Amino acid sequence: MTRVRLFFLCLLLGACVVKAQQADRYLERPLPDGWQEKDTLFQQVLPVDDQWWKVFEDATLDSLIHLAMEQNPSVLMAINRIDQAKAQWRISQSELYPSLSFNGGWERQQTSGNLGNGTPQAWTGYYSASVQMSWQLDVFGVIRQKAKAQKELYAASKEEYNATMVSLCAEVASAYFNLREMQQEVDVLRRNAASQEAVVAITETRYKTGLVSKLDVAQAKSVYYSTLASIPIAEASVIQYLNTLAVLLGLYPQDVTEALSASRPLPDYMEPVGVGVPGELLLRRPDVRAAERQVNAQAALLGASKKDWLPSFFLNGSFGYASHNVKDMGKKGSMTWSIAPSMTWNIFTGGRNLQEERLQRAKLDESIHQFNETVLTAMQEVDNAMSAYKNSIKQIVACREMLYQGKEAFELSLDLYKQGLTPFQNVLDAQRSLLTYENTLVKAKGYSLVCLVQMYQALGGGW
């Protein structure tokens, strides 16, 4: 059993190498051996192939992505485009075969007897039934080349569907993490507002006992109400992300509000990520594979245009019966048939064939440049995502320490203020800093998760 598995693994790896070599022939310059970012956070192995979002271990996110896959309008439209491309391919294939048509009918005719030629008035009528055939013989493979082009476009439409799925899953995950981030920011504001309200109570007590001036009370309230004023803005952002998720899921906003309105913490994920090597992008990124299919299709159309210089061969014929009486229709004497092979050769077209070939060659060159641009963009997106994710991890580590020191500074300044050993300004500064530090940490966590999602998207999403 082990040998059998090893055999099939070798076949699979061999197929991947061949596929990569086929894509390499369109590259204007070879891909680098490694990524620009060199860090232990990234592993030179292929990332997980299926359902990368499960690494976050969030059942709600899993459900949202599966729901979006089933009813997102963009996905449904991509499926329609696959059906259209497949039908177009079948249409082009049908030209390889003869077309048959059946004609049948009855005709009654009267000739005039007043034409002055001595012919008496007469009635004639007959029945007829025949089958006609028309067939263009694909001697030089023009039809096969055009059918090949449509087949490649059909394959490209399937890759575009995969790209739509990758983009959709990334958009759902990003919107979900942005939603959770904003909900956490609302919680931070409310929690700090409660703490600041307690400080207001302390200043009022000290003011009533004559220990401090009313200035302390006013300053404490200004900080408190400033925090309260920030809450509605954050809550509005929560609604916006809920609406964004609703559109991605193909639902109305009220359909998702109840299920997602409750705040939940962000996943605490800072694990190494498999990124593979640059050459594996040619096998993973659906937009790269779609661009390659476009090049193949245009190459086939160029081949077909070159063969327009050659003659075309046709075979037309018919077989049937015709008789004045229905009872004689099946007799041998009523049989009719014809066969008409023909050839057409456009010797002079005013330069149309030459310009058509030049047109298809220019389109091929354009598609090759588009393929190379897609590869370069893919490299850029992966490198950017790797850099952003690596630095976001560093930011989270620094923000955690910053928040720890901010909490300690606030507690110390408040204790000293209660003892009358420090001015209230120190408490105000510590309050403002603590709110800023907590918000910064929440934003950093959300940003890091979005960067990780963008990395999975840039790597092809495992589709």
Image (cartoon, grey):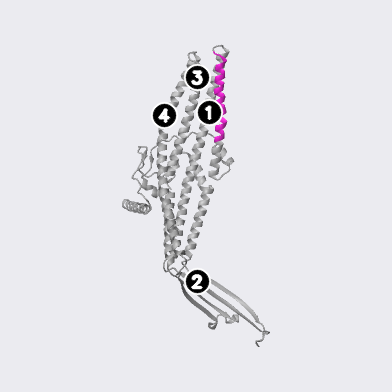
Cα distance in 3D space between marks 4 and 2: 77 Å
| Residue at the outermost bottom position | 118
User: Does residue 457 appear to the left or right of 199 in the view shown?
Assistant: left
The residue range painted magenta reads 212-237
Cα distance in 3D space between marks 3 and 4: 23 Å
Q: Which label's residue is closer to the chain start, 3 or 4?
A: 4
Cα distance in 3D space between marks 2 and 1: 78 Å
**Mark 3 near mark 2, Cβ–Cβ under 8 Å?**
no
> Residue 145 location in percent, x, y?
43, 62
Q: Residue at x 54, y 41 (%)?
A: 244
Cα distance in 3D space between marks 3 and 1: 17 Å
Element carrying mark 3? helix
Local crowd size for mark 2, using a 10 Å CA cut-off: few (<14), some (14–19), many (≥20): some
> Residue 262 location in percent, x, y?
54, 34
Element carrying mark 1? helix
As drawn, the label of residue 189 is: 1
Inspect the magenta stretch and tell me whether residue 271 lies in it: no
Instruction: Provide the residue designation for mark 2.
Output: 134
> Residue 308 location in percent, x, y?
44, 66
Instruction: Provide the residue designation for mark 4.
Output: 398
**Mark 3 near mark 4, Cβ–Cβ under 8 Å?**
no
As drawn, the label of residue 427 is: 3
Element carrying mark 2? strand
> Residue 151 location in percent, x, y?
45, 59
Inspect the magenta stretch and tell me whether residue 236 lies in it: yes
Which amino acid is tagged 3? Val
Cα distance in 3D space between marks 3 and 2: 93 Å
Front-lying residue, 212 or 162 = 212
Q: Main secondary structure of the magenta part?
A: helix
